Image: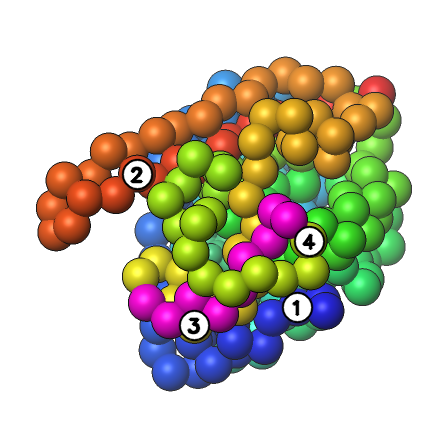
Amino acid sequence: MGFSPEWERQFSSGAHLSRWPWSDLVSLCRRHARHLPSEARILELGCGVGANIPFFLAQGWRYFAVEGSASAAAQAARDFPMLQDAVRVADFTAELPFSGAFDLVVDRAALTHNCERDIRLALARVRECLVPGGLYIGVDWFSTRHADYGRGAAAEDAWTRRDYEQGAFGGVGRVHFSDSGHLRDLFAGWEWLAMEEKTIERFAPEPATLAMWSFVVRKP
Ligand SMILES: C[S@@+](CC[C@H](N)C(=O)[O-])C[C@H]1O[C@@H](n2cnc3c(N)ncnc32)[C@H](O)[C@@H]1O
């Protein structure tokens, strides 16, 4: 288990090169983390090639990231040379290779590409590295209402699927789906500040229901 190596294959073949900050991540950070001062330390889990970095740098925050794909991390370091030492290649379900506490941990569609056991391991580490009152902002965790929950192959637990051959999840390894009860269970002991499910009825090119969670929790 752990990091799905399929991600390295995707990035090294030039796929998943998102370059602009994701709007739901920007909205949630502006709504819930705008009070953070410019010296705040923030950690992004699974930064990919760094789509969200321009937004975080614009806030003036001290940015760190952990990314499992060496190719993606290298691309982020090329585009943001001042972050060369701040973007580390590691499996965040096994380690968070930083010392010092963080004020905010942000994850867009990264933990949700791991199985339940590994998500729990990573969340325990995240909780340890946050200051009391620190925030976790999760964006685009896939919902069990997503049409693809019924596709792919069975994986380690009932919430996780793998081996999609086509579509948005084609070739990316594990995909974890949640309902609200499962999220509350994964984040038991955290304070809930926001939990939102976005459902998109797609009509073209082929009909499908896409559904994702975004949420904000606080370490007491
Ligand atoms: C859907 S991409 C999202 C990338 C970026 N967060 C964004 O918003 O553009 C998921 C990212 O999480 C990373 N990832 C998934 N599981 C990981 C793990 N266990 N350790 C480190 N990185 C992981 C993948 O390599 C990939 O870069």
Give the structural element (helix, strand or loop) at label 2: strand
| Tag 4–tag 3 contact (CB < 8 Å) | no
Query: Given the image, on which type of amino acid does mark 3 rest?
Result: Gly
Residue that label 4 marks: 157
Task: Look at label 1 and name its amino acid.
Answer: Phe
Q: Residue beneath label 3, please?
A: 171
Q: Decide: few, some or many residues near mark 4? Use Cα within 10 Å; few <14, some 14-19, many ≥20.
A: few
Residues packed near mark 3 inside 10 Å, few (<14), some (14 to 19) or many (20 plus): some
Q: Secondary structure at mark 1?
A: loop
Task: Name which residue lies at 49% across and 23% down.
Answer: 196
Residue drawn at point x = 34 percent, y = 51 percent = 20
**What is the CA distance from the residue labelled 4 to the residue labelled 3?**
19 Å
The kind of secondary structure the magenta stretch mainly shows is: loop
Query: Ligand 1 within 8 A of label 1's CB?
Result: yes
Which marked residue is nearer to the observer: mark 3 or mark 2?
Answer: 2
Mark 1 lies on residue: 3
Question: Residue at coordinates 70% horizontally, 26% vertically from top-left?
Answer: 184
Q: Position of residue 88 (x, y in %)?
A: 67, 68
N-terminal of the pair, mark 2 or mark 4, is 4
- Pointer 1 and pointer 3: residues touching (CB < 8 Å)? no
